[in-house]
Amino acid sequence: MGFVAPVIIKGKTLLRELISQKLEWDDMLPEELRQEWENWRDSLRLLEQLQIPRKFLPMSLQKYEKKEVCVYCDASEKAIAAVAYLMAGIVGSHAYMASEHFIIQQVQHEVYATEIDCIRSKSPLPKDSSIRTLNPVIDEEGMLRVGGRLGQADLSTGHKHPLIIPGHHHIATLLVRHYHEQVKHQGRHFSEGAVRAAGLWVTSGKRLINSLIYKCVKCRKLRGREAQQKMANLPVDRLTQSPPFTYVGVDTFGPWNVVTRRTRGGQANSKRWALLFTCLVVRAIHIEVIEELSTSAFINALRRFTSIRGRVKEFRSDRGTNFIGAAGILNVHVINVEDEQIQSFLSENKTSWIFNPPHSSHMGGVWERMIGISRRILDSMLTDVSSKNFTHEVLTTLMAEVCAIVNARPIVPISSDPESPGILTPSTLLTLKTEHVEEMVSDFQIKDLYKSQWRQVQSLADQFWGKWKNEYLHTLQRRHKWFSDEPNVSQDDVVLLKEKNTARNEWPIGVIEKAIPSTDGKVRKAVVRVIREKSATTYTRPISEMVVLLSAEKSNK
């Protein structure tokens, strides 16, 4: 009767509730209780279909060395429940195999009952049977195996006629996971080979193994790729026509050893770094040489830059300590990309500073690329300079020449049209000098160039901006990677946090505390909570530095 206790207890609780109503024996039941009682009464008919197999051990109980009776109890406000079962210790491989075959046989009878009946009655299998192509047979133990064409092969029974396991059954998942762990979380080829070597044929096995490996936390930890999201649209400061160096990206590179003074025994050297300012609109650069990576040196370089190039409306940079310190001392508005009030800060008519998240150099690719170009040009120049003569003055001169070369580069493909020989370069707007002043894209006529100097300057500026709109902007249209929309990471996702110069097995595991969506609703950065030295620490990181191990959204589903 214990097996029907979950059904009987419902009637007992209803009876107890009726007693508490203090009704007479011939009173009508209240409507809500009557409906509930009738539903329970009608459900009792289903007990006629209840079948309980009496055999619960694959072999005699005397062959088990260890026997335990396990009892579990639980209670709620309405009832108390207890369950007891016998747990016996399995001895030897034969006993293990007998238990495995018993479970598989029960699964086969549950899923392939129709096929088993057809085989026993020597009738053809249904045309819609999922195992019809396997030519299934039943062995002497009543197990369903693959028939196939290898019956005469000198192989074991498991290799000639593997046991058929339904791929959609939970037992198949458990078996595949077991053999996947046996091969130490290798790929599908290894896992599938281990399953087949065990004498098992899992229907739709490749799909199941792929799905299991995809969801396997350890496999994601070992080989999972970093999260990705569709490349974001360009910010307004990259697309707004404005004077040069109104919107600027800042970064440092170096160092170089320069001769600072000569001594009797040789010479004394010091290090120098370079601060590169990139105009985000016309892609021009400006380089300042600094003696040290400090806030003070950076502020002096910044003052020299703004004295030459004029007021800057908005800076962008990574989260270098010299940048953060300088922003504070200069009393400019510091904008951290994870701040919620970013739009209100940007709308103010003062100098603003936007910091990219840590470890997200790809978000500053426009100025990181300029550093790479400048470094290559400088390396070429240094091949002609002796280290004995490489002074601070020489370095600053070379940096000025690097700026001139970079700013003279075309920023759009060179036209093959003989009627349009001019090229669009940043220096055209910076110097307002060009060898092709006859190329006009404005309301001015060619004769205007000879009337007054200001008309020539205006015409050259109009020419630049006309080409900038018509030829340059469309080159920014295409995305060169990260083309498709990906599922957003979300709060409570468990992630592996990438750390450079650290073995992957030592990367910390964290939980996303806050997902930070961009203006298009896509999440490209998040706040991650990590436990370090028994204390919680939070980091703001781009999703390209995370490997999602467990998705909270999928787990809830």
Image: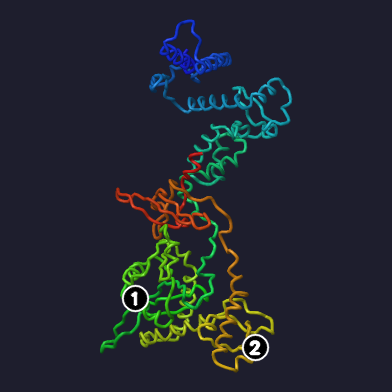
Q: Within 10 Å of the Cα at label 1, are there few (<14), some (14-19), or many (20+) other Cα atoms?
A: some
Q: Is residue 496 above or below residue 310?
A: above
In this rendering, position of residue 309 left or right of residue 107: left
**Secondary structure category for the residue under label 2:** loop
Q: Can you name the residue that lies furthest to the left here?
A: 264
Q: x and y percent of residue 4 in the render?
A: 49, 15
Do residues under tags 1 and 2 come within 8 Å of each other at their CB atoms?
no
Quarter of image, res 457: bottom right
Instruction: Tell me, yes or no, if residue 184 can be seen here.
Output: no
The figure's colour scheme reads rainbow
- Write the residue at 60% across / 91% down: 449
Q: Marks 1/2: CA distance?
A: 45 Å
Q: Within 10 Å of the Cα at label 2, are there few (<14), some (14-19), or many (20+) other Cα atoms?
A: few
Q: Across the whole image, how many numbered discs are drawn on residues?
A: 2
Sequence-first disc among 1 and 2: 1
Q: x and y percent of residue 340 in the render?
A: 42, 57
Q: Is residue 459 above or below residue 179?
A: below
Residue 445: image tag: 2
Residue 299: image tag: 1
Q: x and y percent of residue 462 in the render?
A: 58, 82
Q: Is residue 7 above or below residue 293?
A: above
**Secondary structure category for the residue under label 1:** helix
Instruction: Tell me, yes or no, if residue 312 can be seen here.
Output: yes
In this rendering, position of residue 32 left or right of residue 264: right
Name the residue nearer the viewer: 158 or 529. 529
Mark 1 vs mark 2: in front: 2
Q: Amino acid at mark 1?
A: Ile
Q: x and y percent of residue 309 in the render?
A: 44, 81
Name the residue nearer the viewer: 160 or 70. 70
Q: Is residue 119 above or below residue 434?
A: above
Q: Amino acid at mark 2?
A: Gln
